[in-house]
Image: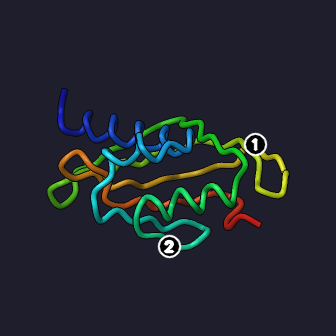
Amino acid sequence: MSDADDAVRVAAAFLSAQAARDVDAARPLASDAFRVVSPGGKQTGLDALFERLRTAYRSLQKLPEAQDVASVDGGWVVYTHGTMVGERSDGTKFDGVRFLDRLVVRDGKVETQQIWNDFGAPR
């Protein structure tokens, strides 16, 4: 298995932990300096990200269609794109919402995550 394959595996496991709202599963996959930029704003640290997910969505599942990986500055960038299905905190259900996540993985840990999607910031 190559380093690129490992980066893709880490990124996929990290996104799965987010979907399951399992911060304990995500913690060993994230660097101590983890930060995220999303339509909902910027968060530093896993606890801030998971709190935002908890307050914005009753449920959220990302259905990846493809992952692309490229080397960058001693690490890997993993792009994952597909669609999302779930329910916002106000009870509004959604599906088929396109997303793209860009995760930087160094030394087997996710350093940064940038998130784009069709509906922007949660209402």
Q: Which residue is mark 2?
A: 42
- Expressed as whole percent of the image width and height from the top left, the position of residue 72 reads 22, 57
In the foreground, 74 or 59:
59
Residue lying at 41% horizontally and 37% vertically, measured from the top left:
13
Give the x, y percent position of residue 66: 48, 36
8 horizontally vs 19: left or right: left
Point out residue 77 in the picture as x, y percentages from the top left corner: 31, 52
Screen quadrant of the C terminus: bottom right
Kindly identify the residue that appears in the image at 66 percent across and 45 percent down. Answer: 60
Q: Is residue 59 above or below residue 115?
A: above
Q: Amino acid at mark 1?
A: Asp
Is residue 106 toward the left or the right of residue 12 in the image?
A: left
Residue 32 vs residue 80, the one in the foreground: 32
Q: In 3D space, how far apart are the residues under numbered discs 1 and 2 (Cα atoms)?
A: 24 Å
Q: Nearer the viewer, mark 1 or mark 2?
A: 2
In the current view of this chain or complex, which residue is farthest to the bottom? 41
Q: Which mark is residue 95?
A: 1
Q: Residue at 22%, 53% (x, y): give it.
A: 106
Image quadrant where residue 14 sits: top left
Q: Residue at x 71, y 64 (%)?
A: 122
